[in-house]
Image: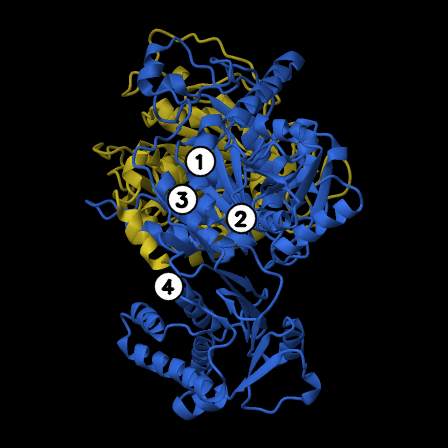
Amino acid sequence: MSYIPKPKVTHPRAARNALGLTSRDYEGAVSTLCAGCGHDSVTAAIVQSVFELDVEPHKLGKMSGIGCSSKTPAYFVSQSHGFNSVHGRMPSVTTGAYAANPDLMYIGVSGDGDSLSIGVGQFVHAIRRNLNMCYIIENNGVYGLTKGQFSASADIGSKPKKGLPNQQEPIDPVSTAISLGASYVARSFSGDKEQLVPLIKGALKHPGFALVDVISPCVTFNDHEGSTKSYEHTRQFYHHVTGVDYIPPAKEIVAEYDKGSVMPVELHDGSRILLRKVDDRYDPTSRAAAFKYLREHFNAGEITTGLLYIDEQRKEMHELMGNVEVPFAELPLDSLRPASGELENILKRYR
Amino acid sequence: MAKVNDAVIKIATVNGTGSASANGLLRKAIFRMGVPVVGKNYFPSNIQGLPTWYEIRVTGDGYQSRANRVDIMVAMNAQTYARDMAEVTTDGILIYDSTWPRSNLLDRDDINVLGVPLSRLCNEHFDGARTRILMKNIAYVGVISALLDIDLDVIKGLLEETFAAKQHLIGANMDAIKLGYDYAIDHFSCPLPYKVEAMDATNNHIVIDGNTAAGLGCLYAGATVGAWYPITPSTSLMDAFRSFCQQYRKDPETGKRTYCIIQAEDELSAIGMVLGASWNGARAFTPTSGPGISLMSEFIGFAYYAEIPAVIFNVQRTGPSTGMPTRTQQSDMMSCAYASHGDTRHVLLFPADPGECFTMAPTAFDLAEGLQTPVMVLSDLDIGMNDWMVPAFEWDEDRTFDRGKVYTAEDLEAMEAFHRYLDVDGDGVPYRTLPGQHPKGSYFTRGSGHTKLGAYTEDADAYQDVIDRLLVKWETARKKVPEPEIIHSKFNTAAILTVGSGDAACKEAMDRLSEQNVGLNYLRVRAFPFSDSVREFIDQHEVIYVVEQNRDAQLRSLLMLDLDADPKKLKSLLHYNGIPINAGFVVDGVLDEIAKGRAA
């Protein structure tokens, strides 16, 4: 992972958030990804999201595995703690980190290789535990750093730059996550920041596992004609079913919405996600209906995007386990052992 | 020859028949009479229906290792009857269920065979197939009690404690005891030449297995996150930790847990969780066995290079591959010492018994946090799952912990800049910060090349600077780890050097050799890297018998690698068939070498 520090210059009239920070304060090192890489747009969307959510930089944990996608935590919020782990193992590290400190907000950035091949087991089990994190997959259908092999999300018939088209079934992270019971599942496109930012904000605020699968084209190895993960293909077959607005706590809903097609979803901290149904037939609260719809549209060659499934009732990992609210590191060790003299009682059964 | 408080009783049963509680009752009754005992399990990797053995060594002398003999065999399993009979030492005793006829071809005239119609007695007295099977096991405890003169009041007391909540079972169990006891009194001349006589040698001792002890040690160490994947023979460690936590780790006000146990999807994930939790400042650990270490290796190397504390208990079993999961070995020393690709080396601790499993648990956390590196505690199945008599554990309320070099928010506020991998104190151990404390404390944890300031690098010198500094840390570790146990007399030029569960057998062997005027000094390593005192000890001797339980002399190799010890001095005595090492093996090995001209 290459690293270039970014000079810090802020426009004096730049907008400031509730913490008095500008969006520049949420930037990281200069990206060393290829010019035009979709991942850089996702990075920009993350920066905008955490800036607008007034996240304290040092209260954000940036987690990743290995791959182009996993480099990106170095490119946003340099005052956050980053954990660039080993290939496919970001979910387990985040699980342990969250178990020890539920106070931090966790954002994991992964790729289709990292999450759907080498790390598919950890991806699946993080969902099963309803780990409270925003899990972004920067999905481009190829391995970039090793120069263009297909990943497990490559569609049947998608053409590589060299060689034969892919013939194996793709693993779709969205329908996989819905089938596993993920409580917040979204798909977006790196080229649609307007849709992506509110989806990421909702994912960060959602208490539980929130997946945002972002089609993020690889300009170097998978942006040619015949690829189903290219900018052009994605733009052409992009099918928007739900628009999302994130409404912070205590903010009035001011915009005018057509009542019949708007669904407010209340989050734990009093904030809301307003779902605007672009396609009235889509029901993001029914796993069965969502599944059917996604499959039908996938069969028609469309890429369904938006907030595709949400369940605000499901308990997240910490709540399920019944652990104390404070970070474990703040519990003095002396408070964690039985009272003085209790050892004698414990040992009675071994006498 | 009458033998008082010196007998080996082996009980052959079928697993899944409830024999464990009967065997535990017998072992505990002898212990309660003040007589030292050891209990060893030989069990199959199976749930129900296969042969299993429990061996009780009544050892007035207090030796804790396995004796390589069987004085009294209780042959309850027809499937293994022939081999069980063959195992009995000359003049020993075999007890069998005489309800059914047995082939005369199996007889041995150099042992005493005692038939007790256990099934018939229990079938006449109890109803229900399951009860009859369970009570048959209790009944042989009654037979042995009569034969060895074990105090029935002690047994009754134990049953009353065990079944305090199920009173009706006390009478039934006591009836079964009496069935066996009375039959033996009526038909045999009790007690036997082997007998148990009350002593006063178990005061302030307990009988406990190493996994329970380690779980208790983690409770006392303040461990808060335990992530694991079930694997024999380590599973009971987390079971123990969980049960202690359920009792002692509830917030008094909210009732919420001050611990988090996560059953991971595999060992790769278990160690990942440990690293995530440790990164956030929790004391986190994972118990596993050899195959788990293989899977965890990538992350162990990551933790070494990114300098994240982690505590791993490796309850070693017989390898390679799946090997024999329910048999013991010390064959992971090499793979743990250098786990992972690249230049890595790891701190290892070697407990010898459950007592050290308890004390080394907090030591492991102190070292892991103090050194910011993974620390592996290498126990084994013999220690972890067998019943050892050890002095009752003590906890010093004034014991302090080493949480390592962690800058607080106040420290950071006062600092100009924080650099994660800077060797501020010259001991090779940098300072770390905990996420969420202060914006100035943020840094990027990575397994890729980094500079001493924590930034990504592909620069040759900046990379090497950090890798070399880790060697400085290694030397700091050498000074911090537990010192070896040494028994030294200036008159001896030869010595035994061993590790972990080899301790008991070696000490017993030294006593026996000493009776034959073979004087040996003794060193038991308790940690890797080896302290300077290990090097000095090797230098002081002409011959070192390195006793370990693996085929490839891994401890000997580590001595050569870490201390550059002279291989010509190091004579291996290797025991690696999966059964715990015994003193006789060590005695024979040393005497063989002396016969070949080696110095004693």
Q: Is residue B581 visible?
A: no
| Circle nearer the viewer, 3 or 4 | 4
* Mark positioned earlier in the residue sequence (3 or 4): 4
Label 3: how many Cα within 10 Å (few below 14, some 14–19, many 20+): many
Have a look at marks 2 and 4 and say if they share a chain. Answer: yes
Chain B rendered in what hue?
A: blue
Q: CA distance from mark 3 to mark 1?
A: 9 Å
Q: Is residue B386 above or below residue A342?
A: below
What is the three-letter code of the residue carrying label 2? Thr
| Residue picked out by circle 2 | B288
* Mark positioned earlier in the residue sequence (4 or 1): 4
Give the x, y percent position of residue B546: 67, 41
Q: CA distance from mark 2 to mark 4?
A: 33 Å
Label 4: how many Cα within 10 Å (few below 14, some 14–19, many 20+): many
What is the three-letter code of the residue carrying label 3? Gly
What is the three-letter code of the residue carrying label 1? Thr
Q: Secondary structure at mark 4?
A: helix
Give the x, y percent position of residue A307: 41, 43
Have a look at marks 1 and 2 and say if they share a chain. Answer: yes
- The chain under label 4 reads B
What is the three-letter code of the residue carrying label 4? Arg
* Mark positioned earlier in the residue sequence (3 or 1): 3
| Residue picked out by circle 1 | B363
Q: Secondary structure at mark 2?
A: strand
Q: Nearer the viewer, residue B202 or A74?
A: B202
Give the x, y percent position of residue A57: 37, 23
Q: Nearer the viewer, residue B508 or B64?
A: B508
Horizontal arrangement in the rendering, residue A177 relative to residue A329 (left or right) = right
| Circle nearer the viewer, 1 or 2 | 1
Q: Please tell me the numbered disc located at residue B32.
A: 4
Position of the N terminus of chain B by quadrant: bottom right
| Residue picked out by circle 3 | B217
